[in-house]
Amino acid sequence: MKELIRDATIDDFKRGYIWDSKKAEFICLICGKYTGKNGSDISAHTAEHGSPIDRVLMLDKKYTGLTEIQKELLEMVSNKYSNKEIGIKLGCAESTVRNMRFALRERARQARAFLAAIELADDGNSKIANPKLRKFPAKEEKRKALLPRFANLFEPNKEYTEAEVKRIIKPIYEDDAIIRRYLVDYGYLGRNDDGSKYYKKCEEVIMDKMSKKEIINNYKQQEIEMGIIQIYNTVNGYSFVDICTNLYKPFESIKFQLNLGRAKSKKLKEDWAAHGESAFEFKVVEKLESNEGATDKEKAKDLKELLNLWIENQGENLKLYK
């Protein structure tokens, strides 16, 4: 039964049953009952377990990866509950519900990409078009030399949404926010006032030609992004996660403190001293969805809820520094 579930396709899960070729019978994925070769019999049986979404949510977490809260959320979403109604039932803020729904949609997108990567790897067709950049240079000269590489990924006279810009940049460098900001600051990309559309400028404006006042004004006009950061130890698999109220260069001060022998976690400090910076990966794992009009206190509360939600979503495999 376990192996059959593991081999089930998306369509099998939606139907609630699978064909067991060894026994030449249909088997219910929910209860494991065999119903013979008649398709109408298995359809009638699985209908007794409820709707298609009900049946999928009945499956064990080891098959779906969903927590009980996520299952409850998806059930309410399928029944067309509003974010406000879901928040009341789950006992959380409406903004938290939005972030939960966003996080699940992101997982779905990642799952599709993961399946594509697995299939390509199995077929031996995986090719890397652009080498992955592990670290964005801190020195001005190296930045200037690197930015045209990102600018060349965009077509002139074409508008891009923020999501499209992210999808183009992320395969090369994980922290797309930094790259987007520099591409705009250095004049490679332009964007409209609300930041929803980007476009490649025909004439590149070099930073040297911009006044210091213009640069400061451009920075002040940009919305500060908040989210959850992760420092992952590639040696032992432990992670340090925390909220971050400004995702512009979120790791610089943390690295500085660690190099001075200071850290919130004693074990993290010891591992940093033992293995060095090269043993750690630095990631922005979640971004707080923009909530216009929210106070700093409300944003801080939403960040903490988003952190707890992200940790819960990782399951038992996540090992945290204390």
Image (cartoon, rainbow, N blue to C red):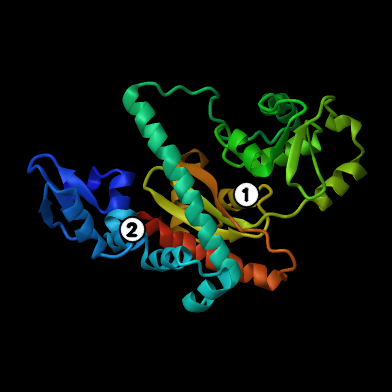
Query: Residue at 73% of width from left, 46% of height from top?
Result: 196
Q: Residues within 10 Å of mark 2 (few under 14, many from 20)?
A: some
Q: Position of residue 199 (x, y in %)?
A: 76, 34
Q: Which corner quadrant holds the C terminus?
A: bottom left
Q: Amino acid at mark 2?
A: Pro
Viewer can see residue 304:
no
* Disc marking residue 294: none
Q: Amino acid at mark 1?
A: Phe
Taking depth in this image into account, of 92 and 207 the one nearest to the observer is 92
Q: Is residue 28 left or right of residue 298?
A: left
Secondary structure beneath disc 1?
A: helix
Taking depth in this image into account, of 280 and 152 the one nearest to the observer is 152
Q: Position of residue 248 (x, y in %)?
A: 69, 49
Q: Is residue 13 left or right of residue 151?
A: left
Residue 294 versus residue 146 in the image, above or below: below
Q: Which residue is mark 2?
A: 52
Q: Position of residue 292 (x, y in %)?
A: 73, 64
Residue 168 versus residue 86 in the image, above or below: above
Viewer can see residue 117:
yes
Q: Which residue is mark 1?
A: 256
> How many numbered tags mark residues here?
2
- Mark before the other along the chain sequence, 1 or 2: 2
C-alpha separation, residue under disc 1 versus residue under disc 2: 52 Å
Cβ–Cβ under 8 Å for marks 1 and 2:
no
Secondary structure beneath disc 2?
A: helix
Query: Residue at 61% of width from left, 49% of height from top?
Result: 251
**Quarter of the image holding residue 162?**
top right
Taking depth in this image into account, of 221 and 196 the one nearest to the observer is 196
Query: Residue at 69% of width from left, 36% of height from top?
Result: 138
